Amino acid sequence: MIKLLIVDDEPMAREIIGEFLTGCGFEVIPAVDGNDGFNKYREHQPQAALIDLQMPGMSGDVLTKTILAENSSFPIIILTGRLPDYSTKDLIDAGARALLEKPINLKELHMQIQKIFQPTA
């Protein structure tokens, strides 16, 4: 089973996304902030992560860069409610596979996750 780390300080977002992805057959590892996310990344060794940008403590962009410094090919999908505050190009250049604006379209999220795990022809 594919393990997905969900890092978001909003409990409702973690719950909705987590329930949806569990229903799609993924194992979900929730984390409440960037520090918790990094610890769970190391502890559980997920195959991909969904990371909110704006969180207290370690922000999502710092968490993304920290994880990618350890594993440059690790798949990360950025989730944000404040897209204009961040440069999409900078996050994609840093290694994020996709950037989705909140409220998250669950079908789009699922499609982006499938892109990560489907081999290219």
Image: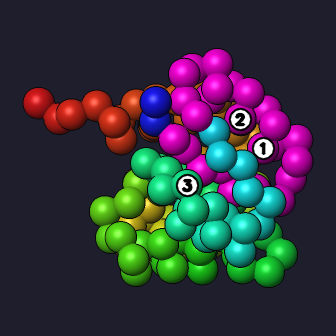
Relative to 60, say whether 48 is above or below.
above
Dot 2 lies on which element? helix
Is residue 119 in view?
A: yes
Using the numbered discs, state the Cα–Cα distance from disc 2 to disc 3 in whole angstroms.
16 Å
Q: Which residues are magenta?
A: 3-27
| Residue drawn at (88%, 41%) of the image | 12
| Residue drawn at (34%, 36%) of the image | 117
Would you name the residue on which mark 3 appears?
Answer: 44
Q: Which quadrant holds residue 114?
A: top left
Most foreground residue, 12 or 85 = 12
- Residue at far front of view: 43
Q: Amino acid at mark 3?
A: His
Disc on res. 14? 1
Would you name the residue on which mark 2 appears?
Answer: 18
Using the numbered discs, state the Cα–Cα distance from disc 1 to disc 2 in whole angstroms.
6 Å
Specify whether residue 13 is painted magenta.
yes
